[in-house]
Amino acid sequence: MSESEARPSNFIRQIIDADLASGKHTSVHTRFPPEPNGYLHIGHAKSICLNFGIAQDYQGQCNLRFDDTNPEKEDIEYVESIKNDVNWLGFKWDGEICYSSDYFDKLYGFAIELINKGLAYIDELSPEQMREYRGTLTEPGKHSPYRDRSVEENLELFEKMKNGEVEEGKMCLRAKIDMASPFMVMRDPVLYRVRFATHHQTGDKWCIYPMYDFTHCISDALEGITHSICTLEFMDNRRLYDWVLENITIDCQPHQYEFSRLNLEYTVMSKRKLNQLVTEKLVDGWDDPRMPTISGLRRRGFTSASIREFCKRIGVTKQDNTIEMSSLESCIRDDLNENAPRAMAVLDPIKVVIENFDADVEMLEVANHPNKPEMGSRQVPFTRELYIEAEDFREEANKKYKRLVLGKEVRLRGAYVIKAERIEKDEAGNVTTIYCTYDNETLGQNPTDGRKVKGVIHWVSADAGVPAEIRLYDRLFTVPNPGAADDFVSVINPESLTVMNGFVEPSLVEAEAEQAYQFERMGYFCADNKDSSKEKLVFNRTVGLRDTWAKIAD
Ligand code: ATP
Ligand code: MG
């Protein structure tokens, strides 16, 4: 698609411009630091486009760093999927992939340094006591009775923790900062805890793991990150970020900047909730086309260009807000309207018999795009028996209905004008077959006697068409902010998936997975990247032709 050419401007880029102008920095180095505890979602795409986009535009560097300090929740499957998704989005990390776990030895050394400086101590309060001692936003906390241990004793106990001689939850290492700080994160935050868990990168080497706030700033400094960009909920943590780096011996002082996270209506973005949808099999995996994950959007038929364009359009600010689903959809619609070849598919078929058509088959040449001749054309078989969309026929209708009506004419897209002569019904009174005649003078032109035929409908040959399962998706939740519901599972939309058994034109047997098509009049579709095969075609509807969200909201 034609991604808008101009570089985006936002407050972070303005800070970078100023830092380069003042000589504070001579180059820019960012990082994208996912925790491998789930698949990436569209919110992560915002962060990826920001961090990698800055590196691209400023000829800087961007690292991909796995923030892997919670071995129990993490998995190598997530590591692989994240690498894959970043690549698919069109970005390349600089150098080797980084892991916070690469720095476990160094982090341990910095913890010892803090202990030696009297700035960290081993606490033995239970988690409940610790909470009680921490105080509240309106009341200062209390000092732990273990706060004033000697350096020697702290070193000895920390060594014991490391050697596996301390049970989980019995001891932890805390920074000694200020139990009366108005910032809760500064009230002697935990730096290390005991976890007897096998780590996906370091195996069983460690049984103590550093906390996020201790790990993140040091990892940034070790990698020479200049601008460490994260979301607003870490604003208070910036104090701790700076405190750690000021109190250890390290010659790099990155700065943290916060921006507002992406929220999208009618979906959830918390990895914990997405994980629950997957483990409770409420969706078909992390890449279910209804999920807001990168892999779900990809499977649904979104292009990476459309996601990058979306991230550009929403911009980067410090204001919390929620974006309408229609903004995301208009990005993919703009892309596919330009770039998707056209094809014909009938989702809910009803049989048409052209009684005066005598040939076996006539191959018609149909353009792949109405205003892009360079996209070429294809052969579409026209036969005596066809399918049209059931909703495109009525026995009676007023003039506004520009489709096929008994006794009237309509044009078949790329083919002839037909007239419905009579119908056949089943016992229940449903129309089963529409018997028609065609006017063989009307291929690519209007009737010669001046008859006006207004409507055009799509069709597929009943003999040569290929059966296909077609999956139509709706929003996954029934309310705009499912995350705010007491039980978000209870507001899942039971009709978020509709499966149709239709027919597609034969050229679509060759459709590559994820290659988008506009099915004439029905929307944009792509072959499912998991379930579709030449033997059993499965198409996903990416998005309809027009915005239907405005209507839904009424
Ligand atoms: P969760 O809290 O659901 O586990 P997370 O924010 O902890 O999500 P990470 O893997 O730590 O997930 O995120 C990696 C990076 O992506 C972080 O810098 C984070 O700030 C950013 N990020 C995560 N969610 C969003 C979002 N919705 N919008 C913008 N950036 C996001
Ligand atoms: Mg996180």
Image (cartoon, rainbow, N blue to C red):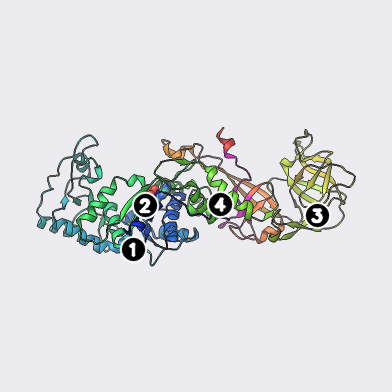
**Residues at discs 2 and 4 in contact (Cβ within 8 Å):** no
Please state the horizontal and vertical placement of residue 491, each as a whole percent of the image: 48, 37
Bounds of the magenta segment: 524-549
Specify few, some or many for label 3: CA neighbours under 10 Å numbering under 14, 14-19, or 20 or more.
many
Q: Which residue is mark 2?
A: 15
Q: Is residue 18 left or right of residue 494?
A: left
Give the Cα separation between the discs numbered 2 and 4. 37 Å
Circle 3 sits on which residue? 383
Q: Residues within 10 Å of mark 4 (few under 14, many from 20)?
A: many
Helix or strand or loop: what does disc 4 sit on?
helix
**Label 3 secondary element:** loop
> 65 above or below 476?
below
Q: Is residue 130 magenta?
A: no
Instruction: Quote the CA–CA distance across marks 1 and 2.
Output: 36 Å
In the rendered image, residue 316, in percent from the top left (x then y), is placed at: 43, 48
The amino acid pointed to by label 2 is: Ile
Q: Position of residue 373 (x, y in %)?
A: 71, 58
Which mark's residue is nearer the viewer, 3 or 2?
2
Camera sees residue 110: yes
Which sits earlier in the primary sequence, circle 4 or circle 3?
4
Q: Are marks 4 and 1 in contact (CB under 8 Å)?
A: no
Left or right of 430: which side holds 177?
Answer: left
Residue corresponding to mark 4: 300
